[in-house]
Amino acid sequence: MRLAERLRCKGRLGLVPTMGYLHEGHLDLVRRCNRLADSTVVSIFVNPAQFGPKEDLSRYPRDFGRDRRMLEKEGVDVIFCPNAAAMYPRGYATWVDVERLTEGMCGRFRPGHFRGVATVVLKLFNIVRPHVAVFGAKDWQQAAVIRRMALDLDTGTRVVVAPTTREKDGLAMSSRNSYLTAKQRAEAPALYEALVTARGLVRAGEKNAEKVKQRALAVIRVGSSGKVQYVEVADPDTLEPVRRIAGPVVVALAVWFGRTRLIDNIVCVPR
Ligand code: AMP
């Protein structure tokens, strides 16, 4: 990335890694990056290494023309979209494993997922060498894993985590929302309702994490036909499960709507 090299010499360089099929949530990260840095690189790469064999790699939505128009409007300096063979050439053998943080939540159900994520993000950091990189709180566990990796491996990149951008009805924006049928789309805001209910309980002083979890589960069951994969109450930094709530916690969940898996989370601070 000779262009990135030149931009880095001129001032602070920012990176926003994405898998494309951009939405307003991605653009909010780009805008934040534009404010934090003098130049912004957005990467678009549907990273095969973070998809399991039965996951949606081949049907993951792609529209490079649309993505490029959206990014041009935001004044992005470089769009970096490598292909899989360039990122993982024949003989590729090196992987980044972040321990502990990857064991619970999504890591329990997507073995190897965070290994793929940490590896590709480190590669992007090494290729672009950004001063700052912006990630979304929507993928809370991913952000925690990357923050840890950047610290442990001395990448020298400042990792910034920006808030989740939501649709008007509360549904967290996601490229995967495009998979939802009209009925599923109408039900999906139940996830955010469940998280807001959980936050209300924690704010009101509920200390029992299991009770918070059960109330969130009930909201999802009543409001949707989604199949819950997990609801967890955890420490926001270590992601260790919490049983008795004595400080800030993250309530995170994953729910299947047909073949579409949605995730979301909320940070709750007791009064
Ligand atoms: P993806 O293209 O889904 O891999 O996401 C690329 C980046 O955008 C990641 O840092 C995500 O956490 C972030 N992101 C995705 N959806 C949202 C959202 N609704 N709000 C904020 N950030 C998001």
Image (tube, rainbow, N blue to C red):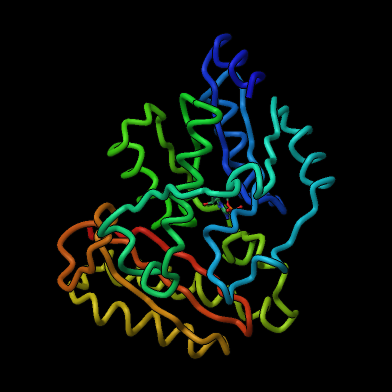
Residue depicted at 26% across the width and 82% down the height: 211
Q: Is residue 244 left or right of residue 181?
A: left
Q: Is residue 54 left or right of residue 175?
A: left
Q: Is residue 211 left or right of residue 174?
A: left
Q: Position of residue 67 (x, y in %)?
A: 77, 45
Residue situated in front as seen by the camera: 91 or 174: 91
In the displayed structure, 28 sits above or below 208; it is above
Residue depicted at 63% across the width and 81% down the height: 259
In the displayed structure, 25 sits above or below 214; it is above
Residue depicted at 63% across the width and 85% down the height: 258
Quarter containing the N terminus: top right
In the displayed structure, 81 sits above or below 252; it is above
Residue depicted at 29% across the width and 70% down the height: 233
Q: Position of residue 268 (x, y in %)?
A: 32, 60
Q: Position of residue 156 (x, y in %)?
A: 37, 26
Q: Position of residue 113 (x, y in %)?
A: 46, 62
